[in-house]
Image (cartoon, helix red, strand yellow):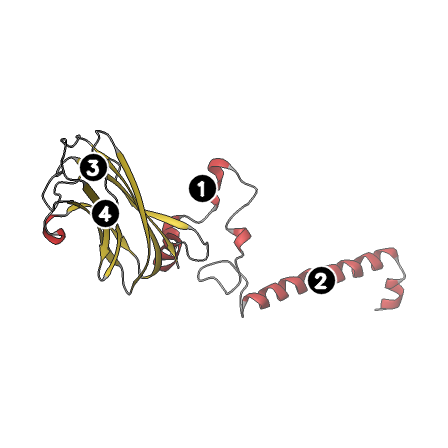
Amino acid sequence: MNFKKILNTKTGRLAVAGVIAASAVLGVSIAANAAGGTGCKTLTYPLCARSVASTQVVDNSLTGADIKTNSLGWTDLDGNTQAQIRKGDGKGGATKLYANATPTVIKNIGGTFSTRHTEVGTFTLPKGTWLVNLSAKFNRTAAAAAGAPEVQPMLQLVGGTNYVTIGGNNISPALDADLFGSAVGLVTVTEDTKFTVNAFGYASDRSDAGSGDITVLANVVVAAA
């Protein structure tokens, strides 16, 4: 066969161009498969390394309800990833771990904190080091009698050997008086640890004056440190 003669014809030149183009496409395919690993030619399970890119999972052009059908859901993530998101690792963000929606009555004023405190709520702090912000709003639901001792309400967050405490100021004896307070602490836990939010208070004469007359709204926010 005279290839030189064939190349000199239009039909021959088109045929050769087609072969070259097909070879180029084949070369790209082979390169892509090689990048994905030996024998990586299909997207059947198990997937080859680097065979799926993030753009194949999430279509950034979608909006609204369509996003849900083209994105990874919460249950698609492994437990460790979910824990890191809850902590806000790498994000520099903060997470609210506890807040009581309705005021809690501080049942007891005076006495021993360990035996007379009022439990406001609980939450679990994951393993790690945390910057904890505890805030409170105390409110008087009953006015104190004339000459009654002053009352100092308090709120304490405790878990393991860690604690953060709000206290030190007296609440006004007037009906519906508010007192606000906050405290910040650095907390380290070596495993997931249950924390309790406890309310209490002391009267200036160390009596039980004010018991049941004060409520508290508590709020706990943490950030990974």
Does the residue at mark 1 contact the one at mark 2 (Cβ under 8 Å)?
no
Mark-to-mark CA distance, 3 and 1? 43 Å
Mark-to-mark CA distance, 1 and 2? 38 Å
Q: Give the left or right position of residue 126, taking residue 88 as reference.
A: left
Q: Which badge, 1 or 4, is on the more N-terminal residue?
A: 1
Residue under the image location 85 percent in, 67 percent down:
3
Furthest residue in direction front, as rendered: 147
Nearer to the camera, 186 or 53: 186
Furthest residue in direction bottom, as rendered: 38
Task: Tell me: residue 91, above or below residue 135.
Answer: below
Quickly name the residue at label 3: 215
Q: Amino acid at mark 1?
A: Lys
Is disc 2 placed on a helix, strand or loop?
Answer: helix
Quickly name the residue at label 4: 155
Nearer to the camera, 118 or 90: 118
Quarter of the view holding residue 17: bottom right
Q: Amino acid at mark 2?
A: Ala
Q: Amino acid at mark 4?
A: Leu
Q: Amino acid at mark 3?
A: Thr
Q: Nearer the viewer, mark 1 or mark 2?
A: 1
Mark-to-mark CA distance, 3 and 4? 11 Å
